[in-house]
Image (tube, rainbow, N blue to C red):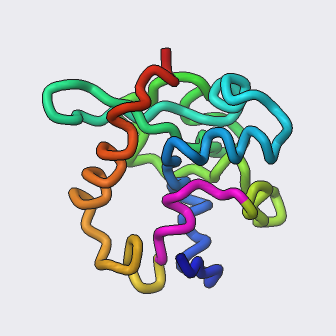
Amino acid sequence: MDACSCEKCISACRRDPGRLIPGDVKKIADFLNIGEKELLERYLVRIPVKGGNRRLFFPAPAKLKASRFLAAPGTVVPDYYDKENGRCVFLTPGGMCEIHEVKPFECAAYMGCKHTFLGRPYKEKDVETFFISRWRKFQDLFR
């Protein structure tokens, strides 16, 4: 994946942080020198989605608005969460990603300037299907 760092691509860091895939959890926890459970409780929120006939969760960095969390880390986000803009918990006040080397999969796969995900036109339904397929077998992480 060729990630971009132009203004349109990094603007997502200020509005809606990218979701993780299962392998990201360990990578980010190791990078921060903390356990996976601590990562989930201190930095990530759980985003619910309907995956077939069951409810699944995707983790994503928590959003901050005016230095307050829109949803507390470790919790399931409220219904309005998607519509609210918020700065990624890993974005420094200077606008740099603290975990850039191990950033969440969606952050690396999305190119805002081209409106693409994994090099294809960004279509919300396709992106949701992608994450559902990755997280279906890993829901025990959230228990």
Magenta residues, dominant SS class: helix
Q: Name the image quarter holding residue 118.
A: bottom left
Classify residue 124 as left or right of residue 91: left
* Residue at horizontal 81 percent and vertical 58 percent from the top: 93
Q: Position of residue 138 (x, y in %)?
A: 43, 30
Vertical order, 91 against 59 (above or below)? below
Q: Position of residue 71 (x, y in %)?
A: 55, 30
Q: Position of residue 69 (x, y in %)?
A: 63, 34
Q: Name the image quarter holding residue 114.
A: bottom left
Classify residue 137 as left or right of residue 27: left
* In front of the other: 38 or 94: 38
39 in the magenta segment: no
106 in the magenta segment: yes
Q: What's drawn in magenta, residue-wise?
A: 102-111
Vertical order, 78 against 98 (above or below)? above
Q: Position of residue 85 (x, y in %)?
A: 50, 52
Vertical order, 3 against 41 (above or below)? below
* In front of the other: 29 or 45: 29
* Residue at horizontal 39 percent and vertical 71 percent from the top: 117
Classify residue 96 as left or right of residue 123: right
Vertical order, 20 against 120 (above or below)? above
* Residue at horizontal 63 percent and vertical 52 percent from the top: 87
Q: Among all residues in the image, which is located at the extreme top? A: 143
